[in-house]
Image (tube, rainbow, N blue to C red):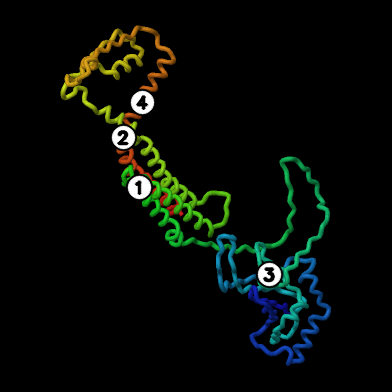
Amino acid sequence: MSLAHVSIPSLLHKNNLRVIVTRTDKKCDLFRNPYRRDTLLELLRGYDKRFRPQHGGPPVVITVHMFISSFGPVSEVDMDFSLEIYLQQQWIDERLKFEDRDLVMNLDYDTIQDIWIPDTFFLNEKYGYQHTVTKPNVLMRVTGRVPHLILYTPLFSHHTVSNYSELEVNFFLGRDISHQLIKTYVPCVLIVVLSWISLWIPRDATPARVTLGITTVLTLTTTMGNSDRHLPVLSYLTALDIFTTVCNFFVFAVLIEFAFVSFYDKPIYRERRKASTLPTADEKGQQKLHSWQQMNDDDFMGVRPRQVAFTVSSPGKNTNPHKREADYQVRQQSWPIGKADIRSKLGRVNHHIRRGLQPAKVELYARIIMPLLFLMFSIVYYLVYVKAN
């Protein structure tokens, strides 16, 4: 007596299952040979496919072979992939044993329905073309009481799962960065560089600078939306999200810089800057002035000034006799410095700071600082996310 070796090769998603009960390589037609037909009928007489081989004894050892015919496509949005494989299962069924070692029987699909087949299923399967992988997918649950005591507490949870053997197949996929490099990274970098052109456009060309800034912001937002359209919705940040967000920040910073420079480039601030650069003596006359800045600084530091007098001599060509020579005497008595005085002094300090702000210097610094910061970010991003992985 010899044990029967049962083999089931099958192509997933196609209905071509067959069972080969093999002992030698010699093959013949089962239905044309009465001896083989009678042997099969004798084997199936009293055979109950509802019970596994060695029922009540040790578990059945099943050897699984898998040949991948095709892999893909991979859907990043749905986070799944398609797979077509040849699956072959082999096991020993003592109920199909016979003495003739030269006998080989090829069984069709209808005959397989009378033989026990392992209930193999794919745990993470989403969809099967014909749902006959490797047999019609049927799941049966028997509800019963669990014969053990569980103490339920707020910090304890219990989940009962079935006990079954499992084969694990891992596919390690590597992403080709060239697609994202052409579709996302290069356009984002070019948009950021394009936004820097606004720093070399004259400040008085407001329509050109505003149009360029808004266009780059909208273009970068559209690029980010197109890249997210082909990616799954995740609850965490990805490396691509960090890169596009920083690029959007740099583009938006150029707009903020222009608004800041335009605000301090108003005529009132231009006049203040011009007044701060005027000479202390006129070419046609002499002006004897004491520095108000020194007086304010002394007063601000808490020094109580004495009486201060100064004379302003206007040019001699002035025809108004009252304005030909004017004498101003400023008399300031000593009194304690109060909150109102401190508030007024802080306001004058703020006035001097705003008067000394130069929009041209701000733009000059922005032309140097922004490219350097973006270059530093690109190097760190490459070392952390690209080089490390």
The residues tagged by marks 1 and 2 sit, at their Cα atoms, a distance apart of 18 Å
Q: Amino acid at mark 2?
A: Gln
The residue at which mark 4 appears reads as: 351
Q: Secondary structure at mark 4?
A: helix
Mark 4 or mark 1: whose residue is earlier in sequence: 1
The residues tagged by marks 3 and 2 sit, at their Cα atoms, a distance apart of 82 Å
Mark 4 and mark 3 residues within 8 Å of each other at the beta carbon: no
Q: Which of the two discs, 4 and 3, sits closer to the camera?
A: 4
The residues tagged by marks 4 and 2 sit, at their Cα atoms, a distance apart of 14 Å
Where does residue 8 sit, x and y in percent of width and height? 67, 76
The residues tagged by marks 4 and 1 sit, at their Cα atoms, a distance apart of 29 Å
Question: Which mark, residue 62?
Answer: 3
Where does residue 294 sit, x and y in percent of width and height? 29, 17
Mark 1 or mark 3: whose residue is earlier in sequence: 3
Question: Which mark, residue 358?
Answer: 2
Residue 258 or 222: which is nearer the viewer?
Answer: 258
How dense is the environment of label 3, judged by Cα within 10 Å: few (below 14), some, or many (20 and up)?
Answer: some
Residue 219 shown left or right of residue 105 in the figure:
left
Query: At 38% from the left edge and 36% from the top edge, which residue is drawn?
Result: 263
Q: Amino acid at mark 3?
A: Ile
Residue 270 or 177: which is nearer the viewer?
Answer: 270
Q: Which of the two discs, 3 and 2, sits closer to the camera?
A: 2
Where does residue 150 sit, x and y in percent of width and height? 78, 45
The residue at which mark 1 appears reads as: 198
Q: Secondary structure at mark 3?
A: loop
Where does residue 186 sit, x and y in percent of width and height? 40, 57
Query: At 21% from the left edge and 22% from the top edge, which residue is drawn?
Result: 280
Q: Secondary structure at mark 2?
A: loop
Q: Amino acid at mark 1?
A: Ser
Mark 3 and mark 2 residues within 8 Å of each other at the beta carbon: no
Q: In this rendering, is residue 149 above or below 106?
A: above
